[in-house]
């Protein structure tokens, strides 16, 4: 059986292999997803983000278990940074999810950021599609931290869960610019620590500036002790229900697809431009002219664009 | 783009001595590989499930409890049952007496690295013996 | 210790020696390396002189043996009174086999027992649990119930020996079994002497045989402190262990720092549980590693003693001198042994033995030469014990107390290790104490960095390990290694089946139910555990109840 059929028949090895091929940007995998695209769209995609050390992996583990108790199947994509120096990485999120390993309703995949521009979100979204086709009810995408690339990744989710911890203090100020507004549901993990209530108040205050109809709920949890998990699942469900009833669901997916199309096109253009040695040499030559003020960069850019499109 | 080699570093058995596993994990990372680290006390079933989902090229097993003759062949057996053994290189390391090594190789372990083996030897072995391109 | 004027003259002379003598020699004969370092990478100077210990205050910094700050030792006569306890860690296969080995060791002149348990026992699983498959009796003896414990100590009078048990997460259960065996021998609990390791924090950090999460684990530990202070007063209730931290690859400084930071956490937990510091602190004991860098290790032991005394006096306001004394067991460094040319290990162990003795240890386990390969054979255990006896009876180092004191290098290094360890402790305090620092992965990451650095030094040849990365020879595979009979697992399973058929199961159930109720509440759990093991509840049953109530610890790995 070929990979596409094996995937449709819920073969985990095929899913795993396809994700590898997508990560390696193999055209064959892209072709398979294109072909099976009508099978996507059923899974709920949840982006999980928050500062390093917030306990995202442990929380993900408990959420997955909670959903499993409800009979739902869950796939998890856990992202860890790749070393910019060696290209290697240690992907350690599984350590906090070990008792999920043998549950047939669970699939965990670790991904390195691999440092390529925009490639990570392409890879994670591709992987999410594979797992969607496979038929998982939920797909969690867990990011490393709260940088711009994480924002890009979780934005593509149906629901974004922001994980905070008590005592972030000034960090909240830093995080709020650009990322607080993407959270649909907030949770303060490790809430048995001092300052949990204050952190909650601070987040609520920040959310007061949000004037959309959906007011993100903020709850407390202690993931290690499995506390606050059911409530969090309810909040995630409530967000989903709101999205459907308000018509925001389709609008969000349109927006997400739009962003994906733009990004894929942008990537292809860049690859077409920089993928060939002769093009790179030509740009170098033109840059020399610009540096010596024989040409201007605006004209050069226009020329290149015309040549490509 | 050259794709990175993916390695699962796992500790079957109940012993908690993960110094060797962690050192090798770091060394493989520094050699440009993607290392999936699973933590302590992994059953053969857990290891094999992780290896499949992570679609790794190499399964590296570190064990110091003395239960190697029981647990390492079990991992290979399960990989064979799942029809992925032909694609994955399975290696072992830890306090394993020399006289046990022929038995383990016969059971499908590609190589056993005993204490004192430089990490570079393991790295070179992996690079030279991958089962799929 | 030195007059200012003389010291200034000395410094001038130091400078003169450097300029006139050393520089000349160096220009013709460069030294072996640019920077010399200790076994754990502290910088070492060419020469140490009074200028390197100029601030040393004899009374304040060193004092007398048996007096604060105990730098020179915890007893006034040290080994002139009696030698350290020679205690070889042993145990494998079944209780019957281990019992034989203990009797052999006692006949050979060993003065204390040290019980090694197999991994299922250490993690609270019975031999018939699925995770125990292949592990039963491998690294120690399998104990499933009081029945096994009765066999383990058969014919060994528990009022005559002191017994150390390397058991942590289920320490209360094994201690309860020991008390119950003693009862059957007619020995009262207050006559029992020995130690349980009972140090869960270092399991989270380095050794890995944890069961329960931090908070209930700390409760079990403080319950033991409280119970023993009343019922088993001569029992050392914890052995706060740096040994495994060092084995995981830490430096000497980190070994001291992280061990004492854990010690601080236990003291704080006990005080928070309402215990008076001077009731339990005298029963705290420590456990360190002895590595190859002889002088660094001696300095390490001295620094640890001084630092702990200060912490207990200044931070915890202990009043009893006994609370301030850091008493410790030592084991020679297992990770220093090489699988290559194993006979060389005898020499390493001899050096490490000297380090422990010159550092003032209270008891010592010497590793056997074949431990990098397998469990030690009877012959190699005997050589290891003989090594201690030769140092004790022939080397002369035990005839006077703390003989290296006053060495400019030793005192300087003692100061450095103490200061650097204190700096770490301050960092850990800032993170909220050792349990939080562990949860954040800080301690594990620091150890990992040292361990990886060490590995890189060996691979680059910057650090030489004789027989491993230099002076190698072609060797035949070693023969005659000890093997544990694989049928041990089946044997233990049979024993459990038989036990469950013979015991009064309704009584066992009732006792386990009482334990569960107590675990949900806040009572001291020791009496309930004791009742359960008396009713022949298995280790796995007792730990199973606690697992249900407490949950399990989840490892935090930062690589």
Image (spheres, coloured by chain):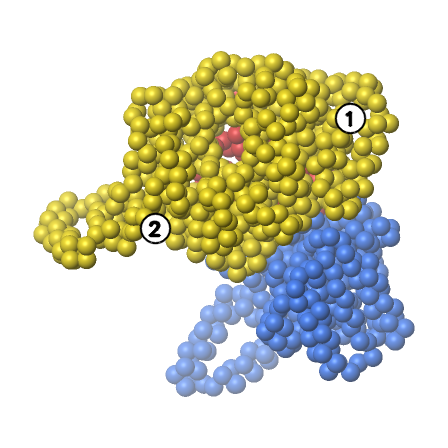
Chain colours: A blue, B red, C yellow
Query: Which residue matches tag 1?
Result: C535
Q: In which quarter of the image is residue C469?
A: top left
Q: Quadrant of residue C211?
A: top right
Q: Establish if A54 lies above or below A287.
A: above
Residue sitting at x 30%, y 31%: C400
Residue B129 seen anywhere in this rendered image of the structure: no
Residue sitting at x 64%, y 44%: C222
Closer-to-camera residue (B64/C62): C62
**Dot 1 lies on which element?**
loop
Residue C11 in picture, x, y percent from top left: 17, 55
Query: Which residue matches tag 2?
Result: C60
Residue sitting at x 25%, y 49%: C45
Q: Mark 1 and mark 2, same subunit? A: yes
Rate crowding at label 2 as few (under 14), some (14 to 19) or many (20 or more) other CA atoms within 10 Å: few
Residue C524 in picture, x, y percent from top left: 71, 42
Residue C171 in picture, x, y percent from top left: 64, 35
Q: Establish if B19 lies above or below A279.
A: above
Camera-side mark, 1 or 2? 2
Residue C466 in picture, x, y percent from top left: 34, 31
Q: Which of the chains bears the disc numbered 2?
A: C
Q: Which of the chains bears the disc numbered 1?
A: C
Closer-to-camera residue (C532/A49): C532
Q: Establish if A286 lies above or below C501.
A: below
């Amino acid at each position: 059986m070929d990979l596409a059929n094996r995937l449709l028949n819920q073969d985990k090895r095929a899913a795993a292999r396809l994700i590898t091929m997508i990560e390696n940007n193999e055209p064959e995998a892209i072709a398979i997803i294109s072909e099976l695209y009508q099978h996507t769209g059923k899974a709920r995609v949840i982006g999980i983000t928050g500062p390093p050390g917030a306990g995202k992996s442990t929380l993900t583990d408990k959420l997955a278990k909670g959903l499993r108790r409800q009979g739902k199947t869950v796939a998890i994509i856990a992202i860890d940074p790749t070393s910019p120096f060696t290209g290697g990485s240690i992907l350690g999120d599984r350590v906090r999810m070990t008792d999920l390993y043998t549950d047939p309703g669970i699939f965990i995949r670790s991904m390195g950021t691999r440092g390529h521009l925009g490639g990570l979100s392409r890879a994670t979204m591709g992987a999410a599609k594979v797992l969607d086709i496979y038929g998982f009810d939920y797909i969690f995408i867990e990011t490393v931290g709260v940088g711009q690339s994480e924002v890009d990744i979780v934005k593509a989710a149906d629901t974004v869960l922001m994980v905070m911890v008590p005592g972030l203090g000034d960090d909240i100020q830093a995080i709020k610019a650009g990322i607080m507004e993407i959270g649909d549901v907030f949770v303060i993990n490790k809430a048995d620590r001092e300052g949990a209530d204050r952190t909650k108040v601070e987040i609520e205050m920040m959310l007061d500036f949000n004037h959309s109809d959906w007011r993100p709920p903020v709850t407390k949890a202690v993931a290690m002790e499995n506390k606050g998990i059911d409530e969090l699942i309810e909040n995630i469900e409530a967000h989903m229900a709101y999205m459907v009833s308000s018509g925001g669901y389709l609008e969000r997916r349109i927006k997400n697809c739009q962003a994906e199309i733009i990004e894929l096109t942008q990537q292809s253009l860049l690859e077409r431009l920089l993928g060939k040695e002769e093009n790179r040499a030509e740009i170098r030559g033109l840059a020399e002219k610009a540096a010596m003020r024989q040409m201007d960069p605006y004209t050069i850019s226009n020329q290149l664009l015309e040549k490509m499109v | 783009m050259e794709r990175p080699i993916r390695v699962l570093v796992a500790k079957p058995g109940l012993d908690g001595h993960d110094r060797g596993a962690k050192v090798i994990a770091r060394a493989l990372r520094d050699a440009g590989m993607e290392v999936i680290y699973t933590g302590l006390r992994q059953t053969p079933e857990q290891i094999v499930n992780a290896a499949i989902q992570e679609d790794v090229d190499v399964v590296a097993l570190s064990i110091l409890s003395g239960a190697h003759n029981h647990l390492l062949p079990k991992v290979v057996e399960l990989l064979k049952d799942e029809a992925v053994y032909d694609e994955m290189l399975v290696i072992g390391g830890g306090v394993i007496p020399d006289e046990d090594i022929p038995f383990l190789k016969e059971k499908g372990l590609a190589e056993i690295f005993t204490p004192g083996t430089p990490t570079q030897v393991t790295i070179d072995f992996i690079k030279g013996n991958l089962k799929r391109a | 210790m030195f007059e200012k004027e003389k010291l200034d003259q000395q410094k001038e002379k130091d400078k003169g020696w450097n300029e006139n003598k050393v520089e000349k020699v160096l220009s013709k004969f460069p030294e072996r390396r640019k920077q010399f370092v200790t076994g754990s990478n502290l910088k070492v100077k060419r020469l140490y002189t009074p200028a390197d210990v100029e601030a040393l205050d004899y009374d304040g910094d060193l004092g007398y043996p048996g007096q604060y700050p105990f730098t020179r030792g915890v007893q006034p006569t040290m080994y002139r009174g009696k030698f350290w306890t020679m205690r070889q860690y042993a145990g494998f296969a079944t209780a019957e086999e281990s019992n034989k080995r203990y009797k052999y060791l006692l006949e050979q002149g060993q003065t204390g027992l040290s019980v090694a348990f197999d991994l299922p026992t250490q993690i609270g699983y019975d031999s018939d649990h699925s995770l125990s498959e292949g592990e039963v009796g491998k690294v120690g003896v399998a104990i499933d119930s009081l029945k096994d414990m009765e066999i383990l100590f058969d014919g060994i009078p528990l009022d005559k020996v002191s017994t150390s048990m390397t058991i942590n997460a289920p320490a209360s259960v094994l201690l309860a079994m020991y008390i119950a065996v003693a009862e059957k021998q007619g020995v009262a609990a207050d006559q029992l002497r020995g130690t349980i390791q009972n140090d869960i924090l270092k399991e989270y950090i380095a050794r890995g045989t944890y069961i329960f999460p931090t908070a209930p684990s700390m409760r079990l530990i403080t319950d033991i402190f409280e119970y023993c202070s009343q019922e088993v007063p001569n029992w050392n209730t914890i052995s706060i262990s740096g040994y495994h931290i060092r084995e995981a690859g830490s430096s000497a400084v980190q070994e001291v720092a992280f061990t004492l930071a854990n010690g601080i956490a236990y003291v704080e937990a006990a005080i928070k549980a309402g215990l008076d510091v001077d009731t339990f602190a005298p029963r705290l004991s420590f456990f360190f590693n002895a590595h190859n860098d002889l002088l660094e290790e001696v300095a390490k032991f001295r620094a640890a003693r001084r630092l702990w005394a200060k912490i207990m006096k200044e931070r915890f306001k202990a009043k009893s001198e006994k609370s301030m004394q850091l008493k410790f067991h030592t084991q020679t460094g297992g990770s220093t042994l090489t699988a290559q040319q194993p006979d060389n290990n005898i020499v390493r162990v001899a050096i490490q033995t000297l380090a422990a003795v010159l550092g003032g240890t209270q008891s010592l386990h010497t590793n056997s030469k074949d431990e990098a390969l397998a469990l030690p054979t009877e012959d190699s255990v005997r050589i290891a014990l003989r090594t201690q006896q030769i140092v004790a009876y022939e080397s002369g180092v035990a005839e006077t107390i703390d003989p290296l004191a006053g060495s400019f290098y030793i005192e300087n290094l003692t100061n450095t290790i103490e200061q650097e360890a204190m700096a770490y402790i301050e960092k850990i305090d800032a993170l909220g104490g050792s349990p939080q620092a562990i949860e954040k992965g800080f301690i594990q990451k620091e150890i990992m960095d040292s361990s990886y650095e060490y590995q890189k030094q060996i691979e680059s040849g910057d650090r030489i390990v004789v027989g491993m990365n230099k002076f190698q020879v072609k060797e035949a595979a070693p023969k005659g290694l000890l093997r544990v009979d694989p049928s041990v697992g089946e044997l233990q399973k049979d024993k459990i089946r038989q036990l469950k058929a013979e015991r009064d199961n309704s009584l066992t159930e009732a006792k386990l139910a009482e334990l569960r109720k107590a675990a949900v509440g806040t009572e001291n759990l020791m009496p309930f555990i004791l009742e359960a093991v008396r009713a022949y509840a298995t280790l796995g049953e007792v730990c199973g109840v606690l697992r249900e109530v407490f949950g399990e610890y989840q490892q935090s790995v930062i690589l």
